[in-house]
Amino acid sequence: MKDKVVLVTGARTGIGLATARIFAEAGATVALAGRHEPNEEARQLTSEGYKAVSYKCDVVNEEEVAAMIDDIIRKYGRLDAAYNNAGIQSPVTDTADLVGDEYDKIMNINLKGIFNCMKHELRYMRQQGFGAIVNCSSMGGLVGIAGRSAYHASKHGVLGLTKSSALEYASRGVRINAVCPGIIMTPMVEGMLEHEKDAMDELIKEVPIARLGGPEEIASVVFWLCSPAASYVIGQAIAVDGGYTVK
């Protein structure tokens, strides 16, 4: 990844930050983006001798996304890879009790946010004739879980967006895939373990590997999907879930 330029959204914590680090350690210039700007995280990477820059960007706001990507191109002249990771979880509730505003919020961040990022990433990648995009779906994009209908709808949508776009750009040098994390020890999951312990305990019992995943285990798959080692991988949804969706 030496001399490559990579964008990671939702990069302040968890999987996003782990992914930014693995690219930085491989020699890329990494743009870390977050609704709360990951200034400290980018500064930590640069203090270690890596190349990193931070952006404050709400992925739901298309103007902010466009401005960020325009600035990356203006500064570095290229965008080699992007990991569209920003997303939120939904509270456990029956579909009949799901508040419309909550549904809209989840869909806006988890699905529209990825669309906004892809749209502007692809405008440059199709011009330069190369690039790799990985979108963050979830094991919830592959299966259903009771009480999580909004979240799973958004993550299923990410896979539809990924697959259709992958077909559009495969012959133009741009590869698009998705990663589907299982239950990963991130701040979001830590909050779920605290506030929804019984539901989470039952969910973890269903994981064949019998443990939670680490952010680095997702980051390594994202890195591979963006690397030449995955040059023939197009439009796939790669489950990294300890075997949960194999059942």
Image (cartoon, grey):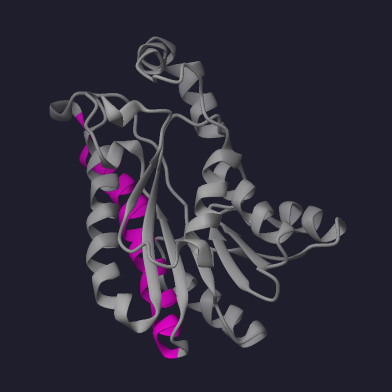
Could you say which is closer to the camera, residue 185 or residue 100? Answer: 185
Residue visible at 65% across and 59% down in the picture: 23
Q: For residue 123: magenta?
A: yes
Q: Quadrant of the rendered structure where residue 56 is?
A: bottom right
Q: Is residue 150 left or right of residue 232?
A: left
* Vertical placement of residue 15 versus 54, above or below: above
* Vertical placement of residue 19 versus 30, above or below: above
Q: Quadrant of the rendered structure where residue 245 is?
A: top left
* Quadrant (top left, top right, bottom left, bottom right) of the C terminus: top left
Q: Main secondary structure of the magenta part?
A: helix
Q: Is residue 70 left or right of residue 201?
A: right
Magenta region: 98-127
Residue visible at 55% across and 56% down in the picture: 223
Residue visible at 57% across and 48% down in the picture: 220
Could you say which is closer to the camera, residue 119 or residue 25? Answer: 25
Residue visible at 44% across and 12% down in the picture: 197
Q: Position of residue 30 (x, y in %)?
A: 66, 65
Q: Position of residue 122 (x, y in %)?
A: 39, 77
Q: For residue 107: magenta?
A: yes
Could you say which is closer to the camera, residue 215 or residue 62? Answer: 215
* Vertical placement of residue 48 versus 173, above or below: above
Residue 29 in view, yes or no: yes
Q: Position of residue 232 (x, y in %)?
A: 38, 66
Q: Which residue lies most toward the left here?
A: 96
* Vertical placement of residue 75 versus 101, above or below: below
Q: Position of residue 194 (x, y in %)?
A: 51, 17
Residue 151 in view, yes or no: no
Q: Quadrant of the rendered structure where residue 43 is?
A: bottom right
* Quadrant (top left, top right, bottom left, bottom right) of the N terminus: bottom right
Q: Which residue lies most toward the bottom here?
A: 127
